[in-house]
Amino acid sequence: MSKSEQSSWQLFIPNYFAAFRAGKSIFLGALIGVIAGLGAILFNKMVFGSVDLCYAQILGWKIEKVTRDASVLVPAEGWRYWVMPLMVAAGGLLSGLLVFTFAPEAEGHGTDAFIKAFHRKRGVIRGRVPIIKTIASAITIGSGGSAGREGPIAQIGAGFGSWLGQVLKVDSKQLRAMIIAGTAGGIGAVFCAPLGGAVFAIEVLYRNQDMETECLIPALVSSLVAFSILTTVTGQSQVFHTPYFDFQAYELLPYAALGVICGLIGVLYVNVFYGARDYLFKKIPTPPHVKPMIGGIMLGALALYQPAVLSGGYGWIERCLNENIGIQFMLSLVFLKMIATAFTISSGGSGGVFGPSLFIGSMLGGAFGYSVAHLFPGWIADPRSFALVGMVAFFSGIAKTPIAALLMVSEMAQSYDLLVPMMLVSSMTYIITDKFTLYEEQVPCKADSPAHMGEYRTDVLEGLRVNEIELRKNWIVFPHHITLRQMLPKILETSQNLFPVADSDGEIEAVFSVDDLRTIMLEEQIYDLIVAEDIAEYEYQSVSLTDDLHTVMRKMTELNADEISVVDKESGKFAGVINRRDVLNLYNRRLHQFQTAD
C-alpha cells in the first residue's frame, strides 16, 4: 500500500466511526421516539377516559368538546355538590398511595425528576417509574386535579430512554442523551410540538441560558418520530386553533408591559407553589400518601365556587384565544388557578405544571389585552393576540425556557404571526423572574452540573492546590450554644450554605449546612430548644490546604454539595470554606493562561 493510499485509509477510519456513532444516535433516538409516541397516545387516552368516567359517568356533567384535545367541564343541573370534592379527594388518595408506595420519585410535576436524573443520577431512572407516573397522573388529572401533561410525559419518555440505555449497557453520557431523547419525544408528541419539545428537553436543564446542544440530534429525531406516530394514529396536528393575528410595531409597548406583568405574577406563582408545599402541606402531620387527598379536598371546595380551575383547562384556553370571556372572569382565574395547582401538585399529587402555566398566562394576557383595547381604543389590532403571547411570557420566565416556550406555543397553535412580540416578552420575563423557577433541580450552567465534571482537564485541576485560592475570611461562625431562633436571621441574610460551629474556646469543632435545617425549620415551637451543636456534624468531610482541586471537586460531587470545609493539616484547625465557584474560577484563569501562552 502506498503512503498516499495509507493516508487516505487512515482518514477514512475516523470518518467511518463518526458516521457509525451518528447512525447509532439517530437509530436510538428513533426507537425511543416510537415508544414515546405510543406512550403519549396511551397517556392521552387514559386521561380522557378518566375525565369521562369521573365527570360524565359519575357526576353526570357535560364534557363540551371545544377542539379534539380541549374540552370544558359543564356542571349538570341538580348534581350532588358534595360528591365532587370527595371524587377529587379520592383521586388524590389513589395517586398518593400509588406513588409513595411504589415510586416516591414520581411525586409532583415530573420534570424535576427528569432534571435530577440527568444531573445527579447519571441518567438512571427506575423501570417502574414511567408505569406508576402514567397511572397516577391519569388519575390525578382525570379526577379534576389542576395539573398538566408535560411533567408526566417527560418522566414517562425519560424513563423508557433510561430503561433502554440500561438494557444496552451504554455509558452514563449516552444514557443521559437517551433520557433527553425520551423527554423530547413525549413532549413533542403530546403537545404537537416536535421542534419545541426537542428544544425544551435540552434547555430546561439549566437556569442561565445554557443547553445540552450535544443531545439536540437524538432529541430532534425522537420528537419528530413521536409526533409523526401520534398524528398518524389520532389525526391531531395541533392543540389550539386561533384566528390570524396581525402585528404592528407600535403594539410592542403594550406587549412589553404584558411581559413585565407576567414576570411579576410569575414570581408570585413560584412563591405560592412552593410556599404551599413548605408552609402548608409539609406541616400537616400525616404520611405523604394521604396529603394529595387533603389537597384534593381543598381543590374540590374551591371548584364548587369556580369549576373552571379543574383539570388542565385547555378548553378555557381555547375560548380565551378566540373570544372575550370577560376581563373580571379571566383575572379571577389567574389567581384561582395558582391556588388550585398548589393544592394539587404541592401536596404531592402527580401532574405537570406546563398546562396550568399556559392557562394562567392566557388568562392574564387576555385580561390585559381587552383592558388595553377598552382604555385605548385602536391601539391594538386584536386583544386575543395578547392571550397567546401571554402563554409564552408566563411560562418562559418561570421555567427558564425562553426559546422552548416560544416554539412550543407557536406549534401548539400553528400560529407564527406573533414571533416578534413573543421574543420580546419571553426575554423580559426571563430577566424579571431572575432566580425564581418552578424547577428546583435546575443548575445555573454546565459548569455547575455533575454531569459535566469529567469534561474538565484533570491535569489542570491536579496541578492546582487549595492554598492557591484566597479563602474568604468573613464566613459566619456560630458558637455551639446559640439557639436556632438566634441563628435564623443571619442564615437568611447570607448566601452561605455551610456554617462552622465553634466551641467555648473559639475553636471550630463542627459544621452544619442549610440542608440540615430543612426539616426542623418547619417546627417553630422548637426554635428556642435547638442549639447549634445539636445540628452540627462533628465528623465532617473536609479537604486540606495542600489538596489538589481535582480531589476537592471529586469530594464535592460525592457529597452532592457546593461547599466544603478546609482544614490546616499541620495545626488541625479550621481554615475556611471553599465553594465550587471558587474552584471553577481558578481553573478557568489557569486554563486561559495555558491557552494564551506563547
Image (cartoon, rainbow, N blue to C red):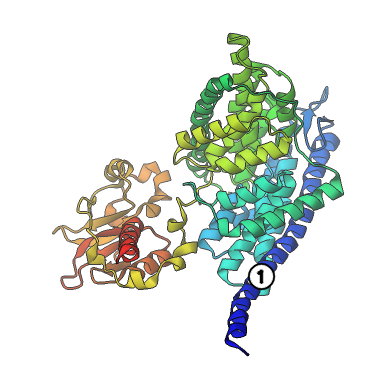
Q: Nearer the viewer, residue 38 or 54?
A: 38
User: Which quadrant of the view contains residue 158?
Assistant: bottom right
Relative side of 38 to 308, left or right: right
How many numbered badges does the structure rendering display? 1
User: Depth check: 65 or 406 in front?
Assistant: 406
Q: Please name whichever residue, 324 or 130, is drawn nearer the observer in this view of the structure.
A: 324
The quadrant where residue 513 appears:
bottom left
- Answer left or right for 380 relative to 400: right
* Residue 361 appears anywhere in the view: no
Quadrant where the image shows the N terminus: bottom right
Please name the residue shown 61% across and 66% down the image: 175
Q: Amino acid at mark 1?
A: Ala
The location of residue 173, given as percent across then percent down, is 56, 67
Helix, strand or loop under label 1: helix
Give how far across and how far down residue 89 sits, in percent: 68, 40
Q: In this rendering, does residue 399 appear at all?
A: yes
285 left or right, relative to 322: left
Q: Is residue 394 above or below residue 8?
A: above
Residue beneath disc 1: 19
- Rendered location of residue 196, percent (x, y): 65, 45
Give the crowd class for mark 1: few <14, some 14-19, many >=20 residues within 10 Å.
Answer: few
| Residue at x-position 38% and y-position 57% | 562
Residue toward you, 317 or 271: 317
- The residue furthest bottom is 1
Please state the horizontal and vertical placement of residue 389, each as a whole percent of the image: 62, 29
544 sits left or right of 554 in the view: left
